[in-house]
Amino acid sequence: MEILARAKALEAQGAHVVHFEIGEPDFPPPDAAIKAAVRALQARRTRYTPAAGLPELREGISRWYRRTYGVEVAPSRILVTPGSSPAFVALFAALLDPGEEVLLPDPGYPCQRNFARIVGAAPKLVPVGPQSRWQLDAEAIAAHWGARTRAAVITNPGNPSGALVDRAFVAEALQAARARGGWLVVDEIYQGLVYGEAKAWSALSISDEVIVVDGFSKRWAMTGMRVGWVVLPSALAAPVERVLQNAVIAAPTEAQYAALAALDADEAVERMRAAYDARRKLLLPALEGIGFRVPCTPEGAFYIYADASRFTDDAEAFCRMVLEQAHVAITPGADFGVHEARRYVRFSYATGLDDIREGIDRLRKILS
């Protein structure tokens, strides 16, 4: 966040900053979603919905899973939340007693460890690397599972890496967690944003015992509308719903109607996915040509996790230097954990092709 704050300060002074640090889509939501939200407000649909979400949205998500992934998910197992973050907090509150552990990858999405801390649980960071595509594999889960461990989390595709893992990988991780009496949580917020030969798929195609968190922020570019969901084994639905009833009451009503409309906006989603892929194809080889090493080719999300050790042994200082000298903002590995953090930086290609070209040119000039 330090880099983003400084980038904003430079922009306030008139600088043109190229933003490779922001993990937020630069597209508007699908038109259908905007129109549905407006219709809901005009119809005065502003009262609370059930804590579990609009019944028609839960049914719509169920149909979407069937159409998109060929997976049958009962609406009763789907709980709608005000973004995927509250889904994690409610889930951890229901699963974890104070002091109990959840295994998280290092590097990984930093908010997940804070979600655990909010409910008094203990995030246990497990070092991961390119050999496991920056993910918690079954071997790591087995090796780090302790007497107080209750769950493990995989983000697929990953953040900060953009790496995608396959069904066999997740199935083995699920087996490792369930064999120890715990749960596997798969964060699928970037599923659907996959590229090349990779195909989008859901962990729900493996088992009803896996927990999946997803939402409308990334795939549908609806970050500010705050609608997410969690799919649970039937036995966990009621405990998590009770947390939602008390902690959040419900997701915004008009945003839920927008989300329902967005589920059918396949053409808009595909346009965004194709645009991200074009950006990836431009940025990835350019970074490697400059001298960054990308040991794990990103196949999803909109991130590249790059080894900057050719240029520095202090990624934080490197990112500050690049920002001050070239007005290019990138994120240091320390924002995602401690494991090899001094070597790595994350590039986000959630920015337009012209800015990507400009950023590449600036990096070449100061690093050549």
Image: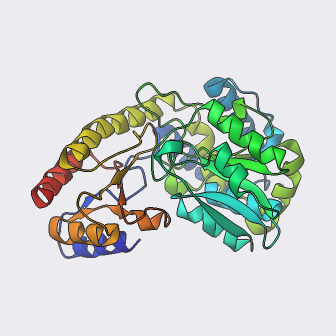
> Residue 246 at what x, y percent from top left?
81, 67
In the image, 105 versus 326, the foreground residue is 105
Q: Is residue 311 above or below residue 189?
A: below
Q: Quadrant where the N terminus lies? A: bottom left
In the image, 16 versus 225, the foreground residue is 16
Please tell me which residue is depicted at 44% across the width and 36% down the height of the picture.
299
> Residue 65 at what x, y percent from top left?
67, 31
Please tell me which residue is depicted at 57% across the width and 43% down the height of the picture.
156
> Residue 315 at what x, y percent from top left?
33, 66
> Residue 312 sits in which quadrant?
bottom left
In the rendered view, how is the structure colored? Answer: rainbow
Please tell me which residue is depicted at 24% across the width and 57% down the height of the picture.
310
Question: Is 167 left or right of 208, judged from the image as shown?
Answer: left
Q: Is residue 28 above or below residue 166?
A: below
Q: Look at the image and tell me whether residue 84 can be seen.
A: yes
Q: How many marks?
A: 0
> Residue 151 sits in which quadrant?
bottom right
Q: Quadrant where the C terminus lies? A: bottom left
Please tell me which residue is depicted at 73% across the width and 41% down the height of the picture.
174
